[in-house]
């Protein structure tokens, strides 16, 4: 596998159009840049968990190079939009306050296939998120960055899904166990990582981190960008990772339910003025 599928310098930076930026998107991009850039910490964790799988460890190293590039591309766009934003300083602030559990030798998911399923869920989330962000903006450079990142995230999903199948053959998790891992990882999307990244990237230097406040600020700006088609695709990917049939009747019921929950949450956040 090539180290990356595209280069930051190949992006259409000369087409940057400040007049087409929705100000609410800027703090989201700054926060996303930090989370993406931190991928090496996850590689260290994955290399601990899969210490005897040399092939997967090499794959994980290449994966991280792509994720770090996502962070650099988003960070560069954010610095272009807001010259006061210092990407490296924000990264340092994020790392000082948020730590990935990299010392663990066993997966926090209880099994190796569970770990792979959790990775599939993360890639499902990122590929649908960047598609939704890209669809919601008319700024040409950001649109192209999101298009390329979303394509990478979909490839990452396929990659982790390949190893999910390998470890499922060894460990034999059933669909219920797979679904349990998937749902628990989905539930973690409102944990500290994104909220803290939002704080580190956007809050004034003297402000104190408050999970509820920054999680709401992030979620209110992010969730409203999703449309039913993005949720449909994400739910189909979750179904696939869990060994359930995507594009089935059950899948469309789940997708309508997920959309209803997200729409309700978005409306509440807007009403609260988060
Ligand atoms: Fe990424
Ligand atoms: Fe990814």
Image: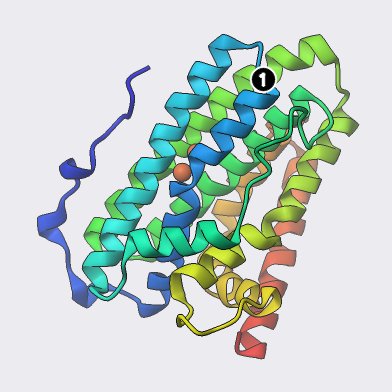
Residue 194 x/y as whole percent: 58, 61
The answer to which quarter of the image holds residue 49 is top right
In terms of image quadrants, where is residue 204?
bottom left
Q: Residue furthest left?
A: 14
Tell me where residue 149 appears, x and y as whole percent: 39, 44
Could you tell me if residue 243 is visible in this image?
A: no
Q: Position of residue 147 (x, y in %)?
A: 35, 46
Seen at 23% across and 59% down, the residue is 140
Q: How many numbered marks appear?
A: 1
Coloring applied to the structure: rainbow
Residue 272 visible? The answer is yes
Q: Which residue is mark 1?
A: 50
Residue occupying image coordinates x 17% and y 68%: 17
In the foreground, 136 or 219: 219
What secondary structure is found at the residue carrying circle 1? loop
> In percent of the image, x 81 and y 26: which residue is there?
111
Residue 238 against residue 35 in the figure, above or below: above
């Amino acid at each position: 596998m090539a180290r990356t599928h595209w280069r930051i310098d190949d992006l259409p930076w000369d087409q940057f159009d400040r007049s087409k930026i929705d100000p609410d998107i800027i703090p989201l991009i700054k926060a996303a840049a930090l989370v993406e850039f931190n991928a090496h910490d996850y590689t260290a964790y994955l290399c601990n968990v899969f210490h005897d799988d040399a092939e997967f460890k090499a794959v994980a190293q290449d994966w991280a190079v792509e994720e770090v590039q996502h962070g650099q591309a988003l960070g560069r766009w954010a610095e272009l939009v807001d010259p006061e934003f210092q990407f490296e300083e924000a990264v340092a602030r994020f790392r000082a306050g948020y730590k990935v559990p990299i010392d663990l030798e066993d997966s926090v998911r209880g099994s190796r296939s569970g770990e792979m399923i959790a990775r599939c869920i993360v890639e499902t989330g990122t590929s649908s998120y960047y598609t939704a962000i890209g669809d919601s903006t008319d700024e040409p450079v950001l649109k192209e960055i999101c298009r390329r990142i979303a394509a990478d995230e979909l490839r990452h999903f396929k990659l982790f899904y390949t190893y999910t199948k390998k470890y499922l053959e060894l460990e034999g998790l059933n669909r219920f166990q797979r679904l349990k891992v998937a749902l628990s990882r989905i539930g973690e999307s409102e944990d500290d990582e994104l909220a803290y990244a939002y704080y580190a990237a956007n809050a004034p230097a003297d402000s104190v981190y408050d999970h509820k406040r920054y999680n709401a600020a992030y979620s209110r700006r992010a969730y409203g960008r999703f449309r039913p088609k993005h949720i449909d695709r994400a739910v189909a990917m979750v179904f696939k990772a869990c060994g359930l049939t995507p594009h089935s009747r059950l899948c469309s019921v789940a997708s309508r339910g997920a959309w209803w929950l997200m729409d309700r949450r978005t409306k509440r956040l807007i009403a609260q003025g988060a």
